[in-house]
Amino acid sequence: MWENCFYIGGDDDGVFETELGGIGAAVCWELIRTETLSRMTGRVGLVITGTHWWDLPGNWPAVPYLLRSGARGNRKLSEQAPVDFARRLGVPVIQASHCGTLAGDFYLAPMWDARLPYRTTFVGATQIMDGWGRVVAQRNTQEGPGVVVGEVQLGQVRTAGSIAVPDRFWIPKLPVLHRLYWAHQNWACKGMYQRVGRTKGLDAAAAR
C-alpha cells in the first residue's frame, strides 16, 4: 500500500540458503498472502518476519467510534497472522513488530496531491512461534519497546503442505474494509510514485 510511494517491481522470492538451511523472510501483509506460503512451502526451516501494521486513524472524527469493531478485528488479525503462518508452514517464525505512534499522509487519488493527515498507532506483537504455531514468547505493541527470547527447534515439524493453502489471494477471509483499503491505497500510492516518488528517489540516490 503506502510502500508503493517509494518503489515498484522486484522478483525476490524471500527464501535464502544459509548454513542453517533455507530461511524465509516476509514483511507485514505478506504474512497473510497465499503467494507467500506457496513460495516458501517445503523450502524453509525458519521464517524471520517483521511488520509495521498500523491501526485506524485516531484523528479522523467519528472513525474510532463508527469502526470500533473493525479496529478490534484489525488488532486480532495482526497478532494472529504470524501464528497462523507458522502453523501452515510447519516451521518456527520469529516476528518483530514496530510499536508506538505513527504520523503521515493518506493519499486520496493518484492524479493529484490531495491527502489527509493520518495519526495512528502500531498494532500486533513481537513474538516467537514454534512450528506448530504455539507462541513461545510474546510482547504486545501496547507494552512498548522490548525484546522477547525463546527456544524453538529449527526445521519442519509436519509434512510440507499438510494444511491446504486457500484458493484465494489472502489466507484469511479478509474483511471488506481491509480489501477496500488495500485496493484504494495501492491505486493512490502508485500514482504518487509515478508523479514524484521515482524522481525524488533517483535524486536522493544520485546525491549520495
Image (cartoon, grey):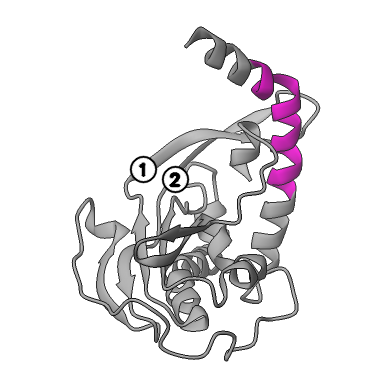
**Residue at left 28%, top 58%?**
142
Secondary structure beneath disc 1? strand
Amino acid type, mark 1: Thr
Tell me, yes or no, whether the highlighted magenta stretch contains residue 46.
Answer: no
- Judging by the rendered image, the residue that carries numbered circle 1 is 101
Q: Is residue 28 left or right of residue 33?
A: left
Q: Is residue 140 above or below residue 183?
A: below
Could you say where residue 131 lies in the image, as x and y percent from the top left?
Answer: 39, 82
Could you say where residue 115 lies in the image, as x and y percent from the top left?
Answer: 65, 30
Secondary structure beneath disc 2? strand
- Neighbor class of circle 1 (other Cα within 10 Å; few <14, some 14-19, many 20+) is few
**Circle on res. 179:** none
Amino acid type, mark 2: Thr
Label 1 to label 2: alpha-carbon separation: 6 Å
Front residue (pair 178, 37): 37
Query: Total of numbered circles in the picture?
Result: 2
- Neighbor class of circle 2 (other Cα within 10 Å; few <14, some 14-19, many 20+) is some
Tell me, yes or no, whether the highlighted magenta stretch contains residue 186.
Answer: yes
Range shown magenta: 184-199
Helix, strand or loop: magenta stretch: helix
- Whether the residues at callouts 1 and 2 have beta carbons within 8 Å, the answer is yes
Mark found first going from the N terminus, 1 or 2 = 1
Front residue (pair 31, 187): 31
Q: Is residue 147 left or right of residue 186?
A: left
Could you say where residue 188 lies in the image, as x and y percent from the top left?
Answer: 73, 37
**Residue at left 47%, top 11%?**
208
> Which of the 4 image quarters holds residue 106?
top right
**Circle on res. 120:** 2
Q: Is residue 40 above or below residue 48?
A: below
**Residue at left 58%, top 89%?**
163
